Each structure stands twice: as structure tokens, then as C-alpha cells.
Image: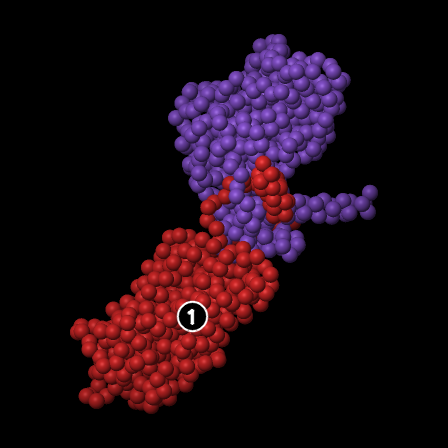
Amino acid sequence: MLRRRYGTFVGGLDLPDEKQETLSRPVRAAFVPQRLHVPLAYGPGPQAAPRVSRGQYVSAGDMLAEGSPPDSVHVLAPMSGLVSAFTTADVAAGGRFVTVDAVEMTALQPAQPPQTPFGPIDWRRAPANMLSDRLAEGALTTCSHPVRPLAAWLAEARQANVALLVVSGMEDEPYVTSDHRTLAEHGEDVLFALALLARIIGASETAMVVDERRTGDYAHVMAPAEAHGVHLIALPYKYPTGAEPILLKILTGLEVPIGRTSFHIGAAVISPATALAVARWALRGRPTLTRILTLAGHQIIHPVNIPVPFGTPCAELSQITHAPLTHGGPMKGLNCTPRAVVTPATNAVLALAAPEPVSPCPCIRCGWCTDHCPARLNVSLLNDALELADLPTARRAGAMACVDCGVCSYVCPSRLPLTYRVAQLKRAIAGRRQLARSSAAEPAS
Amino acid sequence: MSQSRQTDLRGLVFTRRHFPSPHAPLVRAPEAASTVYRVTLAAACAPMLAGIVFMGFRAANVAIISITGCILMESLYYRVTRQPALLGLSHAVLTGMLLALSLPAFVPWYVPAIAAAFAIILGKAVLGGVGHFVWQPALVGRLAVAVMFPAVLTTPAQAYPDAWPVLAQNNIIIGDVRTYTYEPDYKPWHGRAATLRGDAFLMKRPEAILHPLTHPSNDRDALLADTGAYGSIWGMPGPPGTYPPALDKMPIIDDLILGAVPGGIGETSAAILIVAGLYLIYRHYVKWQLPLSIILAAAIIVAVAPIHLVAPDQTIQRVWWPVLHEGLDIGVIYVSYHLFSGGLLLAAFFLATEQTTRPVTTGGQVLFGIGCGTLAMLLRLYTPVPIPSYMAVLGMNTFTQTIDRMWRPRVLGRSRWPWLAAIGNGR
């Protein structure tokens, strides 16, 4: 399924790298926050039901809330401490913050989660069902957007006959180095998890894709990669090579049809963080309670990569009070709300200098958005369609193919929030489609 | 403390209004729309300087009047409509500069002033200002004065129709284009140092010299009188006293390329126009496909479209493929004379590339450029329109929206021929 040679894609651009501060600095010991707001869901879906009461002491790894396995996972206590209240928290999902219920924990102590005593398993021989059941016990989620239970992801991947499993270390956003540090420090574990997951979902080919400029730091994974039969692929830098449809287009030459996932073309992409979580559970029986994230930016005094417990309020990571924080990388991230918390998909929390406020001018049709769009969209036409509320034109122009990379907003000399506007169009089109589907279904039922 | 809180509050209000928080990306490329216009303006200064060299201080006068007029009108527009001047006045200045480049230098002061008023009010303000106009505003102003003052713009010297002044070699920059003499023997610029009594001399514009070759309204006698074209573009060497043939009347190609020929202020200097255009391409403000498609389309039309020649039996013949008629060497010279003369290069590099009035996609721009080049050459060869290249650009501007809607690049994840895929799937 992999091509013999890898090309590039139309559009995209070279962004300033800005990673030097954290690139070669080892991951520090876990961050200890003052309080936690552990969210009971990582998106607008069903939430786990709390199984603790206020004032109860829980130790790290204890179950805080019980999920219903296919749709949601159990929520574990990321640290030892007291359950002090039931509140809400904002989690990033689908390009915006969603408010969900949360369990507040205080009096936190750093503690190693207990290791579940596993019998040794021969993962190369054991049946795939047994392995997937074993993984399902770990309350694991995918550690990239969208966050969903790993068991559900595995079930869908197995159903879709995925032939190619890719772990993507193409960390293409400026400042962010968490995947890079994960690969540099836990590369063997990531490769093990890749081979394990490929065995479970029946993928015949596995590949690890990294940035061409960072290959010097990944020399130690060459031998394990050969042992596991993983293709190591280094791609030249261009933003957004890391976006899933773009990456698969480069690797396989196949394009994910509009509105489908990459399973449709028989490929799946996971992040190194997901792989690391799988490896920790499968090898050592340790649940994943923290996320390695990059803490960097102009207003961060000590930029680091640091494991942060899930549910840590982003505001606690700020080293300067009132610095505006960004949840995620600078291109796809969100401005933190006061209640924003760290989730498994939080790859960075950045304190960037507040952009000087400029009011957008009318579109002058310079066409730079269209030239740089990796999905080859005519973004200025979509902007017109939004201003005129012309959804059919937007749909015909292919608005749903947008990969949310943010390039159009980045280059726009009129400072128009184009990415946001296209996202609005996508939401409106999807909503209308859903409406049409439900109204079409009504007479039948 | 109160100061900082106020600033925060203002930022918050602003954020809610224009940048719905939260949204990505949080970093921005440094270039702003006004930068685009400023850099284009800087590039447009090059042909203006060439114009000042060859047309004298009157060219600078025209530019100053036109730019001032555009700035005044734009400010008035913002004042009357109470809109914030988000882009500043950079686009107004650029419009004034392009307008001056397209006007001849000998026009009286009210011509650039009225053209500027039309450019900003009719070309821009009425249609909704920056980003919303349909036709290139400078050309709207140019067209308005071409319609209102046809005599003033086309025949500066009543006694010598079709002849336009250009400064003599000994009078560049400081000379006055309006004090001209008519000296048919004067060979400008090439070879020897010229000394001329007036500041400028009168001469037919290059495209006007070539025009009788193709213009269908010319009868045989006029064709003979004008070109002496006995069955040839180059012309047969006739007996002494006969009229020199068409291409012999053309200025030396060096002069044509440098710009020492009569014409609009920014139209004549082909070399400077090409260099300025390449700079715009280098800065990515212009895609190379657009000027190239205009020039190629124009070259092909000139190479193919028929010319009218007088056969030895004194009948007028229509000859297709003039580029091959005399052999390719003379054909190439004929085609390049057409490309370097008139406003074609100015239109290709500066006027057709106005961001708002050209299609956005590359394919659309090629289509647009082919239309512009074809139309410009057809108008120049076969009609008496005084500003064929500009009319072509204005005409194609009308179809920009249509081209943008119809020419859709293949979107990621969508098949190139969806109907074919549907047949293949048996649906």
C-alpha cells in the first residue's frame, strides 16, 4: 500500500520552526498541580458516571467514574488526593471547547499508579481478540483529536480491514516538540505498540513517519524497527504534512473521500502518544494518567516538555500570571478558556505573545489562501459564500474537504479569520445534511 | 493598573466582535494587504521614472494630479460613507499611479483630475470599495476620459493627426512635451546625438504605424500611401520618392524596448515594465502564468491574424499567417513590434494583475489571460479603439466572477470526473 517514493502535496508552506528551546531538552518529572478538574468525557459524547463522593480520598489509578465500555472509558484518578467538588471543565473537541462535567480533586500528592500484575503474554502468538480485550481493560483513549476510547477505535479499524498503520511523528506545528521527545526517549515502546496494534487490527504494513530534520535523534529505533518490520519514513518539512489526509496522500497516493475517515482507504494513523500509552499498558500494566506536553512560548520562562496529569487546569501551567494561553499548537490550537483543562490530546500549552489586534479588511482576492490550501480549496470563494450565506455554493466548492490546518488564515493579508469561517460553513453544511437526513427518515419511520 | 485593565477590556470587546474566541491559528504571516499595494506601487514607480525620463516633467505633473485626485476622492468616500479606512489610502495611491501610467504626458491638467474622480467614484466607491469592485478602477478612469475627451487624448497636434510627441535626445527629463516640432527626417535617439529646436518631435506611435496593415476600413490608396506595402510587410525597395514601407517606418527596436517612442507615460518602456513585472512575480504578488498567458495569446493572434497587402496587380489581398509570409525572421520582428508597442505590457504586468479584478485560481487566471491577450490584439488590429489593451482587460474583468465560479480545481478527496466514477460504480 505504501508507495515506493514519496512526493509532496500542492500548497502548504514553511512555517517558522521555533522549536529550539525544547527540542533537545529531556522530558522532566511529572507536573504537580494545586487542583485537578478531571473531565468525565473528552467531547460532546456520553459522559462517565461518577463513582466517588465528595470528601473521599482516592489514590492514583482508582476509578473516579464508570464508563459504558464501547462509547466511553472509565475515568481514573490521575493523582492521589481528595475529591472536593463536582464542577465543570472545558475540553477541546472538534475545534472548540466543550463544557463537560468534572470531578475536582485537591490535596494532591505525586504517586506512581499501581502496576496491574499481568502474566507475561506472548503477543506475537496470542490471538488478536485476547490482545484487544487486554487493551480494553486499560481505560485507554486515543491521544489525538478526536479523543475516543481505544477499544472503539480498534473495533472500527478491525471492521474496516485496515492494511496500513502509521504512527505519525510529523510534528509540523511551530513550538510543539512533545511527539519528538516521546519518540526520542520512548521510541522502542512506540514501535512495540505499533507492531502490537497492527497485529490486533490485522494491518499488514506498518510505518513510522518522522520529520526529515530530526532523524539524528531517532537512531536508536533503527534496530527495533527492523525487528518489528516497521518502515521508517522521513519526510521533508512542509506544513501541514502531519494532517491525516495529507500524510496518507503522500504515503499511499490515495485520497480520503470527503466526509469519510482514513479507514475508508484502508489506512489508520495514530500519534506517538497513543502508542506510548498502549505500550505502557501492554508491557508494564501501567495506566496512562498524564500527557507529555510542550510548555513553551514567549511568556514561558522555562520551556520544557513535561508530563501533566489529565484534568490539570491550563491556567496552572502558566508561569506568569495572566499570560494568555493556547491549548494546542499555534496553528490548530485554541485560546484557553478559564476552565480549560489538559486532556489526552493536549500536545502543547503555549503562552504566545498576544497578537496585536488588527481588524480584518475586506478580501482583496490576492489568492494566497487558494495557492497555499493543501486541500486545493478556493478559500476566497468560500469566504464569499459565508458572507452571502450561500451554502450550496460552499458545498459545491468542496468546503467539507477542509483539513483545518489554518494556512489560509495564516497567510491572509487582509487578516480574515478564514479557517474559522470555513469551519462555520462546514458545521452549517453538516447540520443541514443531518437535518435533511432526519427529515427524510421521518416519513419512513 | 486602570490603564492596563482598560486595554484588556478593549481587547475583549474587539475579540468578541471580529475574532470569535477561540479560533486558530494564533500566529500570522507578517504581510498585510496594504503591504501588497505598497510593494506594487513601488514596482509601478519604475515605469513612471522611465516615463519621466522620456516624456519630461509633464509626466510627473500628470502623476501628481492623478494620485492627489485619487487620494482626495478616496478620503471623501470614507468621510461620506463613514467607513473606517481599514486599508489606509494605499490602494488609492496605487490606482492614481496606474492611471497616470496609462495616460499620455501631454494632456491638460483636468484630464488626470477627471480620470481620478471617475476611477475612485465610478470604479471603486459605487461598487463597494476595496475588495468589491468589478473593473480595474484605474482603467475605468482611463476609459471615462477616452470617451469624454477623444480629441484631446488622441490628436495633440491638430495639423498632424495620429502623431504624438516624444522628447528629443537632447531634452530628456527637463523638456516640455507640449513644445514640439514636426521634422520627418529626424531619426531619434539612435546613432547620433540629436539637436532639435523644439523640446519634442512628433512621430506616429508604433501601433499606429502598424495599424494600416490590418485595419479593414483602409482602401487600397490609403494602404499604398500609408505603408507602400507592395505585397510585403517589409515592403519592396521602391524607386526614389515612394513611401517607405511599414516596418521601415518603425522606430529602431532599441528605442522601442527602452521607451523612447511616443505613447502613454508608462506604456513605452518595455524593458522597465518587464523588470518591474518580474519583481512582482518574485514577490508572489503576481503569478507568472497571468502575464505570460496574456503575452503568448497576443503573440499567437498577431502571428496568425491576417494582414492586408497590395498585390502587384494593385488588388488588396488578405494574407493569413503574417509571421510566415516573409520568412520567420521578419515575422518574429513583426510580432515583437506588436508586443512591445502600445499598452500591452503595462496591461499584462500591472493592470490585468489587479488582485480584486482577476480570477483567483491559477487555471482561471490562464483563461482570463488568454481572453485579455486575444481581445487586446483583435481590438488593436481590426478596430479603431484608441485603448485596445485596456478595453480588453476591462472586458475580461466582467467575466472574472464567472470564471472563478466555473473553474474549480480538483478538491482533495474528490474525484476528477465524478460522473465517470458514478458510472464506474454502477450507480
Residue B164 or B7: which is nearer the viewer? B7
Position of residue B310 relative to residue B44, above or below, is below
Give the total of numbered labels. Answer: 1
At x 35%, y 65%, the residue is B47
At x 51%, y 67%, the residue is B73
At x 47%, y 59%, the residue is B90
State the image coordinates of residue A109 (x, y, percent, origin top left): 62, 14
Residue topped by disc 1: B65
Tell me the quarter of the picture where residue B266 sits: bottom left
For label 1, the SS is helix
Position of residue A444 relative to residue B385, above or below, is above
| Circle 1 chain | B
Q: Colour of chain B?
A: red
Tell me the quarter of the picture where residue B324 sits: bottom left
Q: Is residue B122 left or right of residue B221?
A: right
Q: Colour of chain A?
A: purple
Residue A29 or A301: which is nearer the viewer? A301
